[in-house]
Image (cartoon, coloured by chain):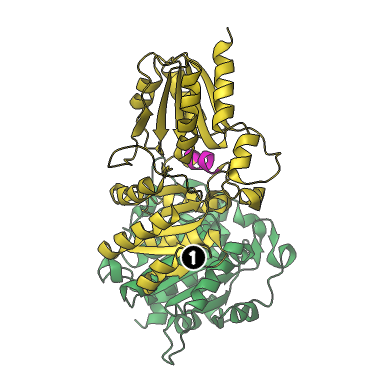
Amino acid sequence: MPLDDRVRASAVAIRQAILRASRRANRGHIGSALSVADLVAGIVHALDLGRRPEEDRDRFVLSKGHAALAYYAGLQQVGILGSSALDEFCADGSRLATHPDRGVPGVSFSTGSLGLGVSYSVGSALAARLRGSSRRTVALMSDAELNCGLTWEALMFAAHHRLHRFQIVIDLNGSQAFGATSDVLDLRPIAARLEAFGFRVDEIDGHDPRQIREALEMPADGDRRPRATVASTKLGHGVSFMEGRLEWHYRPMTDDQYHQAMLEVGPSCDERSSTR
Amino acid sequence: MRRALVDALIELAARDERVVLLTADLGFAFLEAFRDRFPTRFFNVGVAEDNLIGLATGLGADGFVPFAYTMAAFALPRAFEIVRNGPVAHRLPVRIVGVGGGFDYGTDGPSHYALDDLALARALGEIDVFVPADAIQARDAVQAMSGCAGPVYLRLGTELRGVLPIPARAFEPGRIRTLKEGGPRSDVCLLALGPTAFDALEAAPLLEAAGIVTTVVAVSSLRPLLVEDIIRVVSGARMVVTLENHAVEGGLGSLVAEVMAEARLRPRLWRAGVTTRRFAPGRPSYLRAQLGLDASSLARRIGEALREP
């Protein structure tokens, strides 16, 4: 199967896993997880997260820790987490909480406190540089993490030290915990700001597997700048009644909503979005 | 102490290639020797204490042993949450070096004082806290870190106050050192944290001259701390005095009070330390006198307390 099709199939499986696990655990953060499902699918297939020895394995850091369900489901897609791992999601005593914990296979850093994951990731990319390892570090972050001073401290460091195997992917869903990003702290023009901070920037549709794949390919032109991919997404993408609606940052689903959502994220939904 | 730190770091880095030094733009006239010797393992991260700790977390998770250097006023007070969620939560061998504990940067004013850093460190729980009293202890503290799998906060003074009269192996995590033995029936047992041991030592002859039998103990780490050792030295004393260049809340005084209360020890306790934030800046020696923490103030107040019924 061509890579884009595998990514597309994984994204469907990730959405289904998100819905199943959040329904079972009666937990929220569904919208945030759905908005990154395609990005997570693209990243787990683009990086080598499991085959090489630990120190040379690529790193995928979920800085927007509240989308952990998408992360876990993505790690399942490449066999790093077992297929039944999510049965334990949010169970008492389980490591699989609503924010990722370093004890979970494939999770390099415990995240959830916004802004910290980007800084950790830059440290991780610096470690790779010091070791002479060619591994890559990709941090998937929310647009609201651009509110954090620490994010920009870390980006400045990455750019100054030309950590070109470091990449941030920004989930630009335009929505944060208590409002639209444009109402809270308008971040625009994001690409220009990142460029001014020394990043090589792509702007993509964060639900298009081909664009995601291209953004994750290492450029061959010798550019030493770290990379930023600004991926436009929709909160709750794939489920019509969640799309762009802030309450799905928080709410769990009823049984009816769950069945409706599962119908929508199935393969038919995926065809719909790819012919948009 | 900073000189001793840099010498110890160079020695350590020569043996251990995992050692990396990060600074938040501080260490002028001290860290150059490390930078020049190990240019690829030295990073000035800029005035960015949060990122200092975040980067150290990333490096520590990848098998490095990062030393994160900044002022004590900024290390934990500014980057507290990053320290908690980073090196502490991930249990990484990150070494946070805070220079200028207490009011050591006296004439720089209160923005540069660290009167709460030890309380913050204690609140973090799972971070070792070393407070060497002199250059030899500072060197030994760096060496002792090789035995620490988790994070360490190293609080350094900036004043040159001499060398404590103690034998070799000057610093061992958790061990207290008796500098002056007053015997099992001391009138006062002075427990002094880090460089304040010099003030306690200066106060001792003044107390003895007044007929007050005095024991002086140097405490150079808050975690680990051998509780039995504290109980042993304070038991039998009529009065226990803790001394620290830190607020009385949350530092050594609080710790000793907790130990004494839980062990049901009943000697009179005075936690000598900083009790107000409203004081005008000045050199550390001036501030000690102003705040009642110099040798003569200590001797006077202890004498007064012991004369009370």
**Residue B134 at what x, y percent from top left?**
41, 45
Is residue A109 rendered magenta in the image? no
Give the magenta part as a residue range. Answer: B117-123
Report whether A85 appears left or right of A21: left
- The residue indicated by pointer 1 is B29
- Count the numbered circles shown: 1
Q: Is residue B76 in view from this perspective?
A: yes
Q: Is residue A260 in view from this perspective?
A: no
Choose top left, top right, bottom left or bottom right for residue A156: bottom right
Q: Most extreme residue toward the bottom, as rendered?
A: A221
- Identify which residue is drawn at 43% across, 14% down: B264
In this rendered view, identify the residue nearer to me: A40 or B146: B146
Is residue B118 rendered magenta in the image? yes
Label 1: chain letter: B
Q: Check the picture and name the quadrant holding the C terminus of chain A.
A: bottom right
Q: Is residue B213 above or below residue A256?
A: above
In this rendered view, identify the residue nearer to me: A74 or A264: A74
**Residue B290 at what x, y percent from top left?**
65, 35
Chain identifier for the yellow-coloured part of the image: B
Disc 1 crowd, CA 10 A, few/some/many (<14, 14-19, 20+): few
Chain identifier for the green-coloured part of the image: A
Amino acid type at mark 1: Ala
**Residue B144 at what x, y percent from top left?**
31, 47
Q: Is residue B188 above or below residue B167?
A: above
**Residue A73 at what x, y percent from top left?**
41, 61
